[in-house]
Amino acid sequence: MPEPSLNQEKYLQSLKRHKQFVTTARLLLLVVFFVLWEIAVRLHWIDGFIFSSPTRIVSTFISMLADHSIFVHIGTTLTETLVSFILVVFLGITISVILWLSPKLSQILEPYLVVLNSLPKSALAPLLIVWLGANIKTIIIAGISVAIFGTIINLYTEFQEVSHEKIKLIYTLRGTKKDVLLKVILPSTVPVIISIMKVNIGLCLVGVIIGAGVN
Amino acid sequence: MDPLLELKDINYAYHSLNGETHALSNISFQVNDGEFIAIVGPSGCGKSTLLSLICGLLSPESGTILLRGRDMKDSHTEIGYMLQKDHLFEWRSIYSNIMLGLEIQKKVTPEAKEHVEKMIYTYELSKFRDSKPSQLSGGMRQRAALIRTLALDPDLLLLDEPFSALDYQTRLTVCDDIASIIKKEHKTAILVTHDLSEAISVADRVLVLSSRPASIKTIVPIKIDIPVRTPMKSRNAPEFKEYFNRLWKELNKNA
Protein backbone atom coordinates (compact mmCIF):
# COMPACT_ATOMS: atom_id res chain seq x y z
CA MET A 1 0.00 0.00 0.00
CA PRO A 2 1.39 3.47 -0.90
CA GLU A 3 2.21 5.92 1.88
CA PRO A 4 -0.89 8.10 2.56
CA SER A 5 -0.42 11.74 1.58
CA LEU A 6 -0.20 14.51 4.16
CA ASN A 7 -3.72 15.71 3.38
CA GLN A 8 -5.14 12.22 3.72
CA GLU A 9 -3.48 11.94 7.14
CA LYS A 10 -4.87 15.32 8.15
CA TYR A 11 -8.32 14.18 7.08
CA LEU A 12 -8.06 10.96 9.10
CA GLN A 13 -6.88 12.92 12.13
CA SER A 14 -9.82 15.31 11.97
CA LEU A 15 -12.22 12.37 11.58
CA LYS A 16 -10.70 10.79 14.72
CA ARG A 17 -11.00 14.03 16.68
CA HIS A 18 -14.63 14.36 15.63
CA LYS A 19 -15.41 10.84 16.83
CA GLN A 20 -13.67 11.41 20.18
CA PHE A 21 -15.60 14.64 20.70
CA VAL A 22 -18.97 12.92 20.06
CA THR A 23 -18.20 10.07 22.48
CA THR A 24 -16.99 12.42 25.23
CA ALA A 25 -20.02 14.67 24.85
CA ARG A 26 -22.36 11.69 25.03
CA LEU A 27 -20.80 10.39 28.26
CA LEU A 28 -20.72 13.88 29.74
CA LEU A 29 -24.43 14.34 29.03
CA LEU A 30 -25.20 11.09 30.85
CA VAL A 31 -23.13 12.09 33.88
CA VAL A 32 -24.69 15.57 33.98
CA PHE A 33 -28.16 14.00 33.84
CA PHE A 34 -27.52 11.70 36.81
CA VAL A 35 -25.79 14.40 38.85
CA LEU A 36 -28.64 16.87 38.22
CA TRP A 37 -31.18 14.18 39.15
CA GLU A 38 -29.38 13.46 42.43
CA ILE A 39 -29.02 17.14 43.28
CA ALA A 40 -32.65 17.87 42.43
CA VAL A 41 -33.83 15.19 44.85
CA ARG A 42 -31.39 16.17 47.63
CA LEU A 43 -32.44 19.83 47.44
CA HIS A 44 -36.16 18.85 47.28
CA TRP A 45 -36.72 20.42 43.88
CA ILE A 46 -38.55 17.22 42.98
CA ASP A 47 -40.15 14.58 45.20
CA GLY A 48 -37.78 11.64 45.79
CA PHE A 49 -40.70 9.31 46.51
CA ILE A 50 -42.04 9.68 42.98
CA PHE A 51 -38.83 10.23 41.02
CA SER A 52 -36.41 8.15 43.13
CA SER A 53 -32.72 9.04 42.77
CA PRO A 54 -29.63 7.39 41.29
CA THR A 55 -28.17 6.54 44.72
CA ARG A 56 -31.47 5.00 45.89
CA ILE A 57 -31.72 2.90 42.71
CA VAL A 58 -28.17 1.64 43.17
CA SER A 59 -28.72 0.77 46.84
CA THR A 60 -32.02 -1.02 46.10
CA PHE A 61 -30.30 -2.90 43.28
CA ILE A 62 -27.49 -3.98 45.64
CA SER A 63 -29.88 -5.10 48.40
CA MET A 64 -32.04 -7.01 45.86
CA LEU A 65 -28.87 -8.53 44.48
CA ALA A 66 -27.90 -9.58 48.02
CA ASP A 67 -31.18 -11.40 48.72
CA HIS A 68 -31.34 -12.69 45.10
CA SER A 69 -34.85 -11.27 44.62
CA ILE A 70 -33.68 -9.27 41.55
CA PHE A 71 -33.22 -12.46 39.54
CA VAL A 72 -36.77 -13.58 40.27
CA HIS A 73 -38.14 -10.24 39.06
CA ILE A 74 -36.00 -10.09 35.95
CA GLY A 75 -36.90 -13.71 35.22
CA THR A 76 -40.62 -13.02 35.56
CA THR A 77 -40.54 -9.98 33.31
CA LEU A 78 -38.46 -11.80 30.69
CA THR A 79 -40.75 -14.84 30.72
CA GLU A 80 -43.84 -12.67 30.45
CA THR A 81 -42.34 -10.71 27.54
CA LEU A 82 -41.20 -13.84 25.72
CA VAL A 83 -44.52 -15.65 26.18
CA SER A 84 -46.50 -12.68 24.91
CA PHE A 85 -44.04 -12.21 22.03
CA ILE A 86 -44.35 -15.84 20.94
CA LEU A 87 -48.12 -15.66 21.19
CA VAL A 88 -48.17 -12.44 19.13
CA VAL A 89 -46.03 -14.04 16.41
CA PHE A 90 -48.20 -17.13 16.31
CA LEU A 91 -51.58 -15.37 16.51
CA GLY A 92 -50.49 -12.56 14.18
CA ILE A 93 -49.43 -14.88 11.37
CA THR A 94 -52.41 -17.21 11.80
CA ILE A 95 -55.00 -14.43 11.78
CA SER A 96 -53.36 -12.65 8.83
CA VAL A 97 -53.40 -15.88 6.86
CA ILE A 98 -57.09 -16.42 7.68
CA LEU A 99 -57.87 -12.86 6.55
CA TRP A 100 -55.92 -13.42 3.33
CA LEU A 101 -57.77 -16.69 2.70
CA SER A 102 -61.13 -14.97 3.07
CA PRO A 103 -61.35 -11.52 1.44
CA LYS A 104 -64.97 -11.27 2.62
CA LEU A 105 -63.98 -11.70 6.26
CA SER A 106 -61.12 -9.22 5.95
CA GLN A 107 -63.41 -6.60 4.40
CA ILE A 108 -65.90 -7.06 7.25
CA LEU A 109 -63.25 -6.88 9.97
CA GLU A 110 -61.03 -4.13 8.56
CA PRO A 111 -62.59 -1.09 10.33
CA TYR A 112 -62.67 -2.98 13.64
CA LEU A 113 -58.98 -3.83 13.37
CA VAL A 114 -58.13 -0.17 12.77
CA VAL A 115 -60.20 0.87 15.80
CA LEU A 116 -58.69 -1.82 18.02
CA ASN A 117 -55.19 -0.86 16.91
CA SER A 118 -55.68 2.80 17.78
CA LEU A 119 -57.18 1.99 21.19
CA PRO A 120 -54.86 3.17 24.01
CA LYS A 121 -53.80 -0.20 25.37
CA SER A 122 -52.50 1.19 28.66
CA ALA A 123 -56.08 2.24 29.41
CA LEU A 124 -57.11 -1.39 29.05
CA ALA A 125 -54.71 -2.63 31.73
CA PRO A 126 -56.80 -1.66 34.82
CA LEU A 127 -59.87 -3.17 33.15
CA LEU A 128 -58.01 -6.42 32.51
CA ILE A 129 -56.91 -6.61 36.15
CA VAL A 130 -60.45 -6.17 37.45
CA TRP A 131 -61.64 -8.75 34.97
CA LEU A 132 -58.90 -11.40 35.09
CA GLY A 133 -57.28 -10.63 38.44
CA ALA A 134 -53.78 -9.44 39.25
CA ASN A 135 -51.77 -12.34 37.90
CA ILE A 136 -49.33 -13.34 35.18
CA LYS A 137 -52.17 -14.08 32.74
CA THR A 138 -53.27 -10.45 32.84
CA ILE A 139 -49.77 -9.17 32.24
CA ILE A 140 -49.27 -11.47 29.26
CA ILE A 141 -52.58 -10.38 27.78
CA ALA A 142 -51.58 -6.75 28.27
CA GLY A 143 -48.33 -7.54 26.42
CA ILE A 144 -50.19 -9.18 23.56
CA SER A 145 -52.80 -6.43 23.27
CA VAL A 146 -50.15 -3.79 22.61
CA ALA A 147 -48.59 -5.60 19.63
CA ILE A 148 -51.17 -7.89 18.06
CA PHE A 149 -53.40 -5.54 16.03
CA GLY A 150 -50.57 -3.64 14.41
CA THR A 151 -48.96 -6.95 13.48
CA ILE A 152 -52.11 -8.23 11.82
CA ILE A 153 -52.71 -5.02 9.87
CA ASN A 154 -49.10 -4.80 8.66
CA LEU A 155 -48.80 -8.46 7.74
CA TYR A 156 -52.12 -8.56 5.91
CA THR A 157 -51.23 -5.45 3.89
CA GLU A 158 -47.90 -7.05 3.04
CA PHE A 159 -49.63 -10.27 1.92
CA GLN A 160 -51.80 -8.29 -0.45
CA GLU A 161 -48.88 -6.50 -1.98
CA VAL A 162 -47.33 -9.67 -3.41
CA SER A 163 -47.30 -9.34 -7.21
CA HIS A 164 -50.39 -10.75 -8.90
CA GLU A 165 -48.26 -12.04 -11.74
CA LYS A 166 -46.32 -14.24 -9.32
CA ILE A 167 -49.61 -15.64 -8.06
CA LYS A 168 -50.73 -16.19 -11.66
CA LEU A 169 -47.53 -18.16 -12.24
CA ILE A 170 -48.54 -20.62 -9.52
CA TYR A 171 -51.96 -21.05 -11.11
CA THR A 172 -50.44 -21.61 -14.57
CA LEU A 173 -48.41 -24.42 -12.97
CA ARG A 174 -51.77 -25.85 -11.84
CA GLY A 175 -51.22 -24.88 -8.21
CA THR A 176 -53.96 -24.27 -5.66
CA LYS A 177 -54.54 -21.45 -3.19
CA LYS A 178 -52.53 -23.46 -0.67
CA ASP A 179 -49.55 -23.47 -3.06
CA VAL A 180 -49.91 -19.71 -3.53
CA LEU A 181 -49.73 -19.27 0.24
CA LEU A 182 -46.85 -21.65 0.90
CA LYS A 183 -44.74 -21.05 -2.22
CA VAL A 184 -45.23 -17.32 -2.80
CA ILE A 185 -47.00 -15.33 -0.09
CA LEU A 186 -45.18 -16.60 2.99
CA PRO A 187 -41.65 -16.91 1.53
CA SER A 188 -41.79 -13.47 -0.09
CA THR A 189 -42.90 -11.80 3.16
CA VAL A 190 -40.27 -13.41 5.40
CA PRO A 191 -38.10 -10.24 5.54
CA VAL A 192 -41.15 -8.18 6.53
CA ILE A 193 -42.20 -10.73 9.13
CA ILE A 194 -38.74 -10.52 10.68
CA SER A 195 -38.75 -6.72 10.81
CA ILE A 196 -42.27 -6.65 12.31
CA MET A 197 -41.10 -9.10 14.97
CA LYS A 198 -38.14 -6.89 15.86
CA VAL A 199 -40.57 -4.08 16.64
CA ASN A 200 -42.87 -6.48 18.49
CA ILE A 201 -40.38 -7.71 21.06
CA GLY A 202 -40.05 -4.10 22.24
CA LEU A 203 -43.81 -3.54 22.18
CA CYS A 204 -44.41 -6.70 24.22
CA LEU A 205 -41.97 -5.47 26.87
CA VAL A 206 -43.85 -2.16 26.98
CA GLY A 207 -47.15 -4.01 27.39
CA VAL A 208 -45.76 -6.25 30.13
CA ILE A 209 -44.42 -3.26 32.03
CA ILE A 210 -47.76 -1.45 31.72
CA GLY A 211 -49.45 -4.58 33.07
CA ALA A 212 -46.93 -4.98 35.90
CA GLY A 213 -47.06 -1.29 36.74
CA VAL A 214 -50.82 -1.32 37.19
CA ASN A 215 -50.49 -4.45 39.32
CA MET B 1 -56.85 -37.58 -35.12
CA ASP B 2 -58.46 -34.54 -33.52
CA PRO B 3 -56.39 -31.35 -33.59
CA LEU B 4 -54.39 -30.62 -30.46
CA LEU B 5 -56.40 -27.47 -29.78
CA GLU B 6 -59.66 -26.25 -31.20
CA LEU B 7 -61.51 -23.04 -30.33
CA LYS B 8 -65.10 -22.61 -31.45
CA ASP B 9 -66.89 -19.26 -31.33
CA ILE B 10 -65.23 -18.01 -28.17
CA ASN B 11 -66.67 -14.88 -26.58
CA TYR B 12 -65.37 -13.19 -23.48
CA ALA B 13 -66.09 -9.98 -21.58
CA TYR B 14 -64.61 -8.37 -18.47
CA HIS B 15 -67.02 -7.01 -15.90
CA SER B 16 -66.34 -4.12 -13.57
CA LEU B 17 -68.32 -1.43 -11.76
CA ASN B 18 -67.80 0.92 -14.67
CA GLY B 19 -69.37 -1.51 -17.08
CA GLU B 20 -68.64 -4.35 -19.39
CA THR B 21 -65.65 -4.64 -21.70
CA HIS B 22 -66.15 -6.99 -24.59
CA ALA B 23 -62.70 -8.51 -25.11
CA LEU B 24 -63.09 -11.39 -27.56
CA SER B 25 -65.74 -11.96 -30.19
CA ASN B 26 -66.36 -15.21 -32.07
CA ILE B 27 -62.81 -16.52 -32.06
CA SER B 28 -62.39 -19.86 -33.83
CA PHE B 29 -59.19 -21.58 -34.87
CA GLN B 30 -57.29 -24.85 -34.69
CA VAL B 31 -53.75 -25.75 -33.77
CA ASN B 32 -52.15 -28.97 -35.00
CA ASP B 33 -49.30 -30.93 -33.46
CA GLY B 34 -45.85 -29.43 -33.91
CA GLU B 35 -47.15 -26.12 -35.20
CA PHE B 36 -45.83 -22.75 -34.11
CA ILE B 37 -48.62 -20.19 -34.13
CA ALA B 38 -48.11 -16.48 -33.57
CA ILE B 39 -50.94 -14.19 -32.58
CA VAL B 40 -50.52 -10.50 -33.38
CA GLY B 41 -52.85 -7.58 -32.82
CA PRO B 42 -52.99 -4.03 -31.53
CA SER B 43 -52.01 -3.65 -27.87
CA GLY B 44 -54.81 -4.19 -25.39
CA CYS B 45 -56.89 -6.15 -27.89
CA GLY B 46 -57.25 -9.22 -25.69
CA LYS B 47 -54.33 -11.38 -26.80
CA SER B 48 -53.34 -12.32 -23.26
CA THR B 49 -56.97 -12.98 -22.38
CA LEU B 50 -57.06 -15.53 -25.17
CA LEU B 51 -54.09 -17.37 -23.63
CA SER B 52 -55.65 -17.30 -20.16
CA LEU B 53 -58.77 -18.90 -21.65
CA ILE B 54 -56.79 -21.64 -23.41
CA CYS B 55 -54.88 -22.30 -20.19
CA GLY B 56 -58.11 -22.56 -18.23
CA LEU B 57 -57.39 -19.63 -15.90
CA LEU B 58 -60.55 -17.97 -17.24
CA SER B 59 -63.71 -19.56 -18.65
CA PRO B 60 -65.30 -18.29 -21.87
CA GLU B 61 -68.76 -16.72 -21.64
CA SER B 62 -69.80 -18.74 -24.66
CA GLY B 63 -68.11 -21.13 -27.08
CA THR B 64 -66.02 -24.23 -26.52
CA ILE B 65 -62.35 -25.01 -26.21
CA LEU B 66 -61.38 -28.59 -27.07
CA LEU B 67 -58.05 -30.27 -26.41
CA ARG B 68 -57.68 -33.32 -28.64
CA GLY B 69 -61.44 -33.24 -29.13
CA ARG B 70 -62.16 -33.32 -25.41
CA ASP B 71 -63.48 -30.73 -23.03
CA MET B 72 -60.75 -29.04 -20.95
CA LYS B 73 -61.87 -30.58 -17.67
CA ASP B 74 -61.49 -34.20 -18.76
CA SER B 75 -58.54 -33.75 -21.07
CA HIS B 76 -55.10 -35.09 -20.27
CA THR B 77 -53.38 -32.49 -22.40
CA GLU B 78 -50.76 -30.67 -20.38
CA ILE B 79 -50.45 -26.95 -21.08
CA GLY B 80 -47.39 -24.85 -20.23
CA TYR B 81 -47.67 -21.09 -19.88
CA MET B 82 -44.78 -18.66 -20.09
CA LEU B 83 -45.49 -15.20 -18.76
CA GLN B 84 -44.06 -11.86 -19.88
CA LYS B 85 -41.58 -11.76 -17.03
CA ASP B 86 -39.66 -14.78 -15.79
CA HIS B 87 -40.90 -14.41 -12.18
CA LEU B 88 -38.07 -16.53 -10.85
CA PHE B 89 -38.28 -16.45 -7.06
CA GLU B 90 -35.30 -14.74 -5.46
CA TRP B 91 -35.51 -16.95 -2.36
CA ARG B 92 -34.96 -20.09 -4.43
CA SER B 93 -31.90 -21.21 -6.38
CA ILE B 94 -32.21 -21.59 -10.15
CA TYR B 95 -32.53 -25.35 -9.77
CA SER B 96 -35.25 -25.09 -7.15
CA ASN B 97 -37.06 -22.48 -9.29
CA ILE B 98 -37.03 -24.89 -12.20
CA MET B 99 -38.45 -27.63 -9.95
CA LEU B 100 -41.36 -25.42 -8.79
CA GLY B 101 -43.96 -26.81 -11.19
CA LEU B 102 -42.99 -30.43 -10.53
CA GLU B 103 -43.10 -29.73 -6.80
CA ILE B 104 -46.59 -28.22 -7.01
CA GLN B 105 -47.93 -31.11 -9.08
CA LYS B 106 -46.11 -33.63 -6.86
CA LYS B 107 -44.29 -35.09 -9.84
CA VAL B 108 -40.73 -35.02 -8.51
CA THR B 109 -39.78 -38.48 -9.77
CA PRO B 110 -36.27 -39.70 -10.63
CA GLU B 111 -37.22 -39.57 -14.34
CA ALA B 112 -38.45 -35.99 -14.07
CA LYS B 113 -35.27 -35.00 -12.23
CA GLU B 114 -33.16 -36.60 -14.92
CA HIS B 115 -35.11 -34.77 -17.63
CA VAL B 116 -34.53 -31.47 -15.83
CA GLU B 117 -30.83 -32.20 -15.33
CA LYS B 118 -30.49 -32.93 -19.02
CA MET B 119 -32.17 -29.68 -20.01
CA ILE B 120 -30.07 -27.67 -17.54
CA TYR B 121 -26.97 -29.20 -19.12
CA THR B 122 -28.10 -28.86 -22.75
CA TYR B 123 -29.23 -25.27 -22.35
CA GLU B 124 -26.05 -24.25 -20.54
CA LEU B 125 -27.31 -23.41 -17.11
CA SER B 126 -25.21 -25.99 -15.22
CA LYS B 127 -22.85 -23.30 -13.96
CA PHE B 128 -25.76 -21.38 -12.43
CA ARG B 129 -27.61 -24.34 -10.97
CA ASP B 130 -27.22 -23.09 -7.40
CA SER B 131 -27.13 -19.35 -8.15
CA LYS B 132 -29.83 -16.90 -7.18
CA PRO B 133 -31.88 -15.49 -10.09
CA SER B 134 -30.41 -11.99 -9.64
CA GLN B 135 -26.98 -13.35 -10.61
CA LEU B 136 -28.21 -14.27 -14.10
CA SER B 137 -28.62 -12.12 -17.22
CA GLY B 138 -32.09 -11.45 -18.61
CA GLY B 139 -31.63 -14.00 -21.38
CA MET B 140 -30.48 -16.75 -19.03
CA ARG B 141 -33.36 -16.03 -16.67
CA GLN B 142 -35.82 -16.41 -19.53
CA ARG B 143 -34.16 -19.71 -20.44
CA ALA B 144 -34.51 -20.91 -16.84
CA ALA B 145 -38.18 -19.90 -16.91
CA LEU B 146 -38.64 -21.93 -20.12
CA ILE B 147 -37.05 -25.00 -18.54
CA ARG B 148 -39.37 -24.56 -15.56
CA THR B 149 -42.30 -24.71 -18.00
CA LEU B 150 -40.83 -27.59 -20.04
CA ALA B 151 -40.10 -29.62 -16.89
CA LEU B 152 -43.79 -30.50 -16.76
CA ASP B 153 -43.51 -31.87 -20.30
CA PRO B 154 -46.41 -29.85 -21.74
CA ASP B 155 -48.05 -30.83 -25.04
CA LEU B 156 -48.86 -27.22 -25.77
CA LEU B 157 -46.80 -24.14 -24.88
CA LEU B 158 -48.36 -20.72 -24.47
CA LEU B 159 -45.92 -17.81 -24.71
CA ASP B 160 -47.23 -14.44 -23.59
CA GLU B 161 -44.79 -11.87 -25.04
CA PRO B 162 -41.95 -13.65 -23.28
CA PHE B 163 -39.29 -11.41 -24.84
CA SER B 164 -40.89 -8.02 -24.34
CA ALA B 165 -39.06 -7.28 -21.09
CA LEU B 166 -35.65 -7.70 -22.75
CA ASP B 167 -33.61 -5.11 -24.63
CA TYR B 168 -33.62 -5.39 -28.40
CA GLN B 169 -30.30 -7.17 -28.88
CA THR B 170 -30.94 -9.73 -26.14
CA ARG B 171 -34.42 -10.13 -27.48
CA LEU B 172 -33.23 -11.33 -30.88
CA THR B 173 -30.80 -13.84 -29.39
CA VAL B 174 -33.22 -15.11 -26.75
CA CYS B 175 -35.97 -15.45 -29.35
CA ASP B 176 -33.63 -17.53 -31.51
CA ASP B 177 -32.63 -19.50 -28.46
CA ILE B 178 -36.13 -20.24 -27.20
CA ALA B 179 -37.46 -21.05 -30.67
CA SER B 180 -34.69 -23.59 -31.22
CA ILE B 181 -35.32 -25.17 -27.81
CA ILE B 182 -39.03 -25.50 -28.61
CA LYS B 183 -38.19 -27.06 -32.01
CA LYS B 184 -35.72 -29.44 -30.40
CA GLU B 185 -38.22 -30.60 -27.77
CA HIS B 186 -40.86 -31.05 -30.52
CA LYS B 187 -43.39 -28.82 -28.82
CA THR B 188 -46.45 -27.11 -30.19
CA ALA B 189 -46.53 -23.44 -29.30
CA ILE B 190 -48.70 -20.35 -29.43
CA LEU B 191 -46.81 -17.06 -29.19
CA VAL B 192 -48.57 -13.81 -28.43
CA THR B 193 -46.64 -10.72 -29.52
CA HIS B 194 -47.13 -7.19 -30.80
CA ASP B 195 -43.92 -7.42 -32.80
CA LEU B 196 -44.69 -8.36 -36.41
CA SER B 197 -41.10 -9.31 -37.30
CA GLU B 198 -40.90 -11.59 -34.30
CA ALA B 199 -44.15 -13.29 -35.32
CA ILE B 200 -43.03 -13.86 -38.93
CA SER B 201 -39.57 -15.04 -37.89
CA VAL B 202 -40.81 -17.87 -35.65
CA ALA B 203 -44.29 -18.86 -36.77
CA ASP B 204 -45.75 -21.36 -39.20
CA ARG B 205 -49.00 -19.41 -39.18
CA VAL B 206 -49.74 -15.88 -38.03
CA LEU B 207 -53.15 -15.04 -36.66
CA VAL B 208 -54.10 -11.37 -36.97
CA LEU B 209 -56.56 -10.01 -34.43
CA SER B 210 -58.61 -6.82 -34.77
CA SER B 211 -58.77 -4.21 -32.03
CA ARG B 212 -61.22 -4.72 -29.18
CA PRO B 213 -63.47 -6.67 -29.19
CA ALA B 214 -60.90 -8.90 -30.88
CA SER B 215 -61.98 -11.08 -33.76
CA ILE B 216 -59.78 -12.91 -36.23
CA LYS B 217 -59.03 -10.71 -39.23
CA THR B 218 -57.03 -13.26 -41.12
CA ILE B 219 -54.69 -16.20 -40.72
CA VAL B 220 -51.51 -16.01 -42.79
CA PRO B 221 -49.46 -19.18 -43.36
CA ILE B 222 -45.75 -18.39 -43.39
CA LYS B 223 -43.59 -20.37 -45.80
CA ILE B 224 -39.98 -19.42 -45.76
CA ASP B 225 -37.88 -21.49 -48.11
CA ILE B 226 -34.58 -22.05 -46.37
CA PRO B 227 -33.00 -25.40 -45.40
CA VAL B 228 -32.73 -24.89 -41.65
CA ARG B 229 -35.19 -22.32 -40.46
CA THR B 230 -34.25 -20.26 -37.43
CA PRO B 231 -35.80 -16.92 -36.49
CA MET B 232 -32.56 -15.09 -37.28
CA LYS B 233 -32.20 -16.66 -40.74
CA SER B 234 -35.88 -16.12 -41.48
CA ARG B 235 -35.40 -12.41 -40.96
CA ASN B 236 -32.89 -12.36 -43.82
CA ALA B 237 -35.01 -14.41 -46.24
CA PRO B 238 -36.42 -12.55 -49.27
CA GLU B 239 -39.99 -13.59 -48.39
CA PHE B 240 -39.76 -11.90 -44.99
CA LYS B 241 -40.43 -8.40 -46.29
CA GLU B 242 -43.45 -9.48 -48.32
CA TYR B 243 -45.03 -11.12 -45.30
CA PHE B 244 -44.27 -8.08 -43.21
CA ASN B 245 -45.99 -5.74 -45.65
CA ARG B 246 -48.95 -8.04 -45.98
CA LEU B 247 -49.44 -8.35 -42.22
CA TRP B 248 -48.89 -4.63 -41.76
CA LYS B 249 -51.71 -3.93 -44.25
CA GLU B 250 -53.98 -6.43 -42.54
CA LEU B 251 -53.37 -4.89 -39.15
CA ASN B 252 -54.08 -1.37 -40.32
CA LYS B 253 -57.03 -2.16 -42.56
CA ASN B 254 -59.98 0.01 -41.45
CA ALA B 255 -58.36 0.45 -38.05
Image (cartoon, helix red, strand yellow):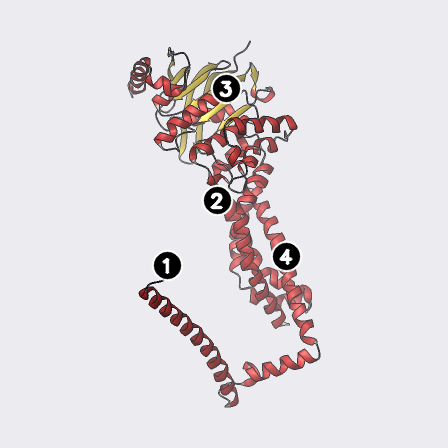
Relative height, residue A11 to residue B229 (above, below)? below
Tag on residue A161?
2
Residue B101: percent from the left, percent from the top? 57, 31
- How far apart marks 3 and 1 lie (CA) works out to 58 Å
Q: Amino acid at mark 1?
A: Pro
Q: Are marks 1 and 2 in contact (CB under 8 Å)?
A: no
Between residues B118 and B106, which one lies in front from this camera angle?
Answer: B118
Residue named by callout 4: A86
- Residue located 40% across and 32% down the image: B19
Residue named by callout 1: A2
Looking at the rendered structure, the secondary structure element under dot 2 is loop
Quarter occupied by residue A61? bottom right
Relative height, residue B174 to residue A105 (above, below)? above
Q: Are marks 4 and 2 in contact (CB under 8 Å)?
A: no
Do marks 4 and 2 both belong to one polypeptide chain? yes
Between residues A1 and B15, which one lies in front from this camera angle?
Answer: A1
Residue A1: percent from the left, percent from the top? 40, 58
- Residue located 67% across and 78% down the image: A65
Quadrant occupied by the C terminus of chain A:
bottom right
Residue named by callout 3: B184
Q: Amino acid at mark 4?
A: Ile
Do marks 2 and 3 both belong to one polypeptide chain? no
| Subunit that carries the residue with mark 1 | A
Residue extending furthest toward the top: B1
- How far apart marks 2 and 3 lie (CA) works out to 39 Å
Q: Amino acid at mark 2?
A: Glu
Residue B174: percent from the left, percent from the top? 42, 28
Nearer the camera: disc 4 or disc 3: 3
- How far apart marks 1 and 2 lie (CA) works out to 51 Å
Relative height, residue A122 to residue B63 (above, below)? below
Looking at the rendered structure, the secondary structure element under dot 1 is loop
